[in-house]
Image (cartoon, rainbow, N blue to C red):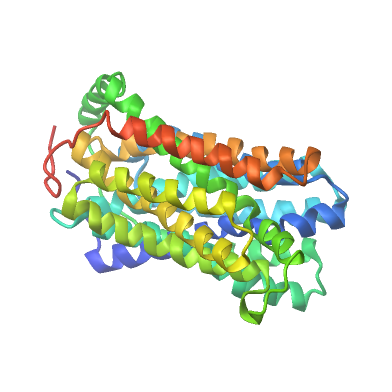
Amino acid sequence: MEKIQRNSWIVIASATLTHLFLGTVYAWSFFQDKIALQMNWTQSESVWAFSLSILFLGLSAAWFGPRTHKYGLWKLAVIGTILYATGFIISGIALHCKWLWLLYLGFGLVGGTGLGMAYVTPVSAVSALSTKKNGLLTGLVVMGFGLGALVMSKILAPAIMEWTGDNLAYTFIIIGSSLLIIQPVIAYQLRYSKEGKKNVIVLAKELKTSLQQPSYYRLFTMFALNITAGMVFISFQSPMYERLLLGTSFNFPLLAEGSTLIAASAIFNGLGRLFWGYYGDKIGTIKAFRQIFIFQLALFTILILTKNPLVFFLSVCFVLWCYGGGFGILPSLIKSQYGSRLMPSVYGITLLGWSFGGIIGPQLVALLQDYMPLEAQRFALIVSGTFITLGFILSLRLQEGLKTGTHSTV
């Protein structure tokens, strides 16, 4: 395995902060209704920017994940963070000019590609450090990504929106410019030496063999289904919640805004990554993933039946706790199944499941809201519950790999 060139705690801190700033993409629902209203675009048109961002995140992670040994982590991290920040700036120009295609190009293609390049590097760097508590450390790192929506929806975006007089274009440009200054400096700390060309060739052969196994297809689909269900809430949780509030006399002022739900669910998303990553170390990653699906089946049943805003609020938070848990478990699960050497490659390719979820989840809700707004939420929840059921069935066909906490050199 490659040798780490930096103090372990510096790598862990840099990895967590890198994910924190990248995770600001999850605050899209804070902007969704505002963009649709101010630009006079439909919900479906607007949310395509977010869907494309997640699509290209998965595509670029799948491409660069198997090539981290070739290019080096810090290079991918720095270039990726620069692209992500630039995507915000281009998006600001698009909103100023009211050019939908440029928003897709900026937030979707450029920003999403940067997300994928940078996303795989923190997990790979920290995974290389640990010989025992791998799930706990990688859970800590991906927790940063989950908390990014909190930073954006409750701190950065509201403050900048107020300062600019609710000018979306200036807000995106300021956010992008700030990230362009901060992110690359932090990402530069994710450095370790490259393997030789011969080892890279050997890894490619081992990777091809591993990905052709039926067990990998089950793992990939299981992960993708969990992501798709969670994406229903991440892209539209704020407007969903605010519409529910309109029909009730809700007497909890602190919980009366959609941005509060974004912030709270972001905390649960982040903590779920840490908790489930640690829990997977204790009981086994496959067993933990099965429990995630079981818990979500109960939550989706509640969400379909309830009209109580508080119950809805808490249920969404726990759905995001499970959603984040999938990300928290995934690095350790892949490492236990395929070993340390293949982990960055298999992990990057598996993130293609995120791409599928980023398209299917948001677009499902957007289309339902555009064409059948009165029944949109209920049907979206039923479909999401179906995804979770299928994911659970697939998890029953998977077995634990190598002993949790051990590292294969195969």
Counting labels gives 0
Q: Residue furthest front?
A: 305
User: Which quadrant: the N terminus?
Assistant: top left
Q: Is residue 136 left or right of residue 141?
A: left
Q: Is residue 33 visible?
A: yes
- The residue shown at (31%, 27%) is 216
Residue at coordinates 51% horizontally, 57% vertically from top-left? 22
Q: Is residue 4 left or right of residue 191?
A: left
Residue appearing at x 50%, y 41% in the figure: 385
Q: From the viewer's perspective, tell me whether residue 342 is left or right of residue 240.
A: left
Q: Position of residue 366 (x, y in %)?
A: 71, 42
| Of the pair 386 and 363, the residue shown nearer to us | 386
Image location of residue 46, percent across then percent down: 75, 46
Q: Quadrant of residue 165?
A: bottom right
Residue 365 rendering spot, x and y as whole percentages? 67, 42
Task: Between residue 148 and residue 9, name the one nearer to us.
Answer: 148
Let me know if residue 55 appears in the view. no
Q: Quadrant of the C terminus?
A: top left
Q: Quadrant of residue 159?
A: bottom right
Is residue 86 placed above or below 105 in the rendered structure? below
The one of 302 and 257 positioned closer to us in this rendering: 302
Identity of the residue drawn at 38% across and 51% down: 295
Check the image and report above or below for 35 versus 389: below
